Image: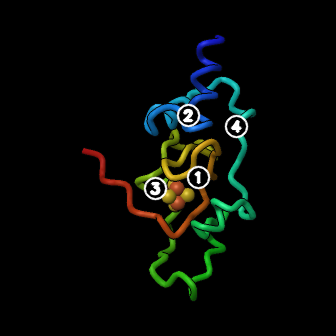
Amino acid sequence: MIARRALLKAALTGGVALPVAAGLLRTAHAEDEIPMLRENDVTAKSLAYVEDAAKVDKNAFPTYKKGQDCSNCSQYIGDKGEPKGACQLVLGQYVLAKGWCKAWEAKPAQP
Ligand code: SF4
């Protein structure tokens, strides 16, 4: 348990590789301890992240298409149907599955 906590702490502080960090975030037992990315956070502002893709400013982001959200973004690491998950661009915080940001890119089709 202590080793797991140490790994999670390292993941949250950037001390381990990104895929490992994302995996730890996704599988952590203490998921409630992992904060959510909020729209007012500096990282969120830099990504123009919104917590609800339905509220994307379509004038500011004309490439946005209805149906795009974090859950179908190539950067998202989360279980299908779960309301939140890790994003490879956001260390130490979860994003909402229904969120969106300007870095959205379609998740590759599964074989
Ligand atoms: S990169 Fe993708 S998963 Fe991450 S916040 Fe932006 S839309 Fe969501």
7 or 94: nearer the viewer: 7
Name the residue carrying label 1: 97
Looking at the image, the residue that sits furthest to the bottom is 59
Name the residue carrying label 3: 72
Q: Are marks 3 and 4 in contact (CB under 8 Å)?
A: no
- Disc 1 to disc 2, how far (Cα)? 13 Å
Q: Amino acid at mark 3?
A: Asn
Which marked residue is nearer to the observer: mark 2 or mark 3?
2
Q: Residues within 10 Å of mark 3 (few under 14, many from 20)?
A: many
Q: Amino acid at mark 4?
A: Ile
Q: Are marks 4 and 2 in contact (CB under 8 Å)?
A: no
Sequence order check, earlier mark of 3 and 1: 3
Q: Secondary structure at mark 4?
A: loop
Residue occupying image coordinates x 60% and y 17%: 4
Which marked residue is nearer to the observer: mark 4 or mark 1?
4
Q: Residues within 10 Å of mark 4 (few under 14, many from 20)?
A: some
